[in-house]
Image (tube, rainbow, N blue to C red):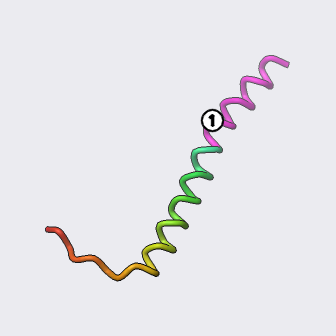
Amino acid sequence: MIMGAAIASVAWICFVPWTKLKELRAQEEQQGRTDPPEADPR
């Protein structure tokens, strides 16, 4: 039971940041489509 909880917690720690990153990328992509293109600062 303890081993199952440890595996579940490790899986949760790995899974949650990936979903948040995916949501953040989708949000940035939406903003990129609505905002005018910015000048390249280089």
Q: Residue placed at 40% from the left, 79% from the top?
A: 35
x, y percentage for residue 21?
54, 53
Q: Main secondary structure of the magenta part?
A: helix
Q: Residue at x 77, y 20 (%)?
A: 3
Residue, far left: 42
The structure residue drawn at horizontal position 20% and vertical position 73%, both measured from the top left corner, is 40
Magenta run includes residue 8: yes
| Front-lying residue, 24 or 7 | 24
Magenta segment: does it hold 25? no
Which residue was labeled with disc 1?
13
Viewer-closest of 22 and 6? 22
Classify residue 17 as left or right of residue 40. Answer: right
Under circle 1, the secondary element is helix
Q: Which residues are magenta?
A: 1-15
Q: Who's the residue at 58% across and 59% down the image?
A: 23
Residue 1 vs 26, above or below: the answer is: above
**x, y percent for residue 1:** 85, 19
Residue 25 locus on image (x, y percent): 51, 62
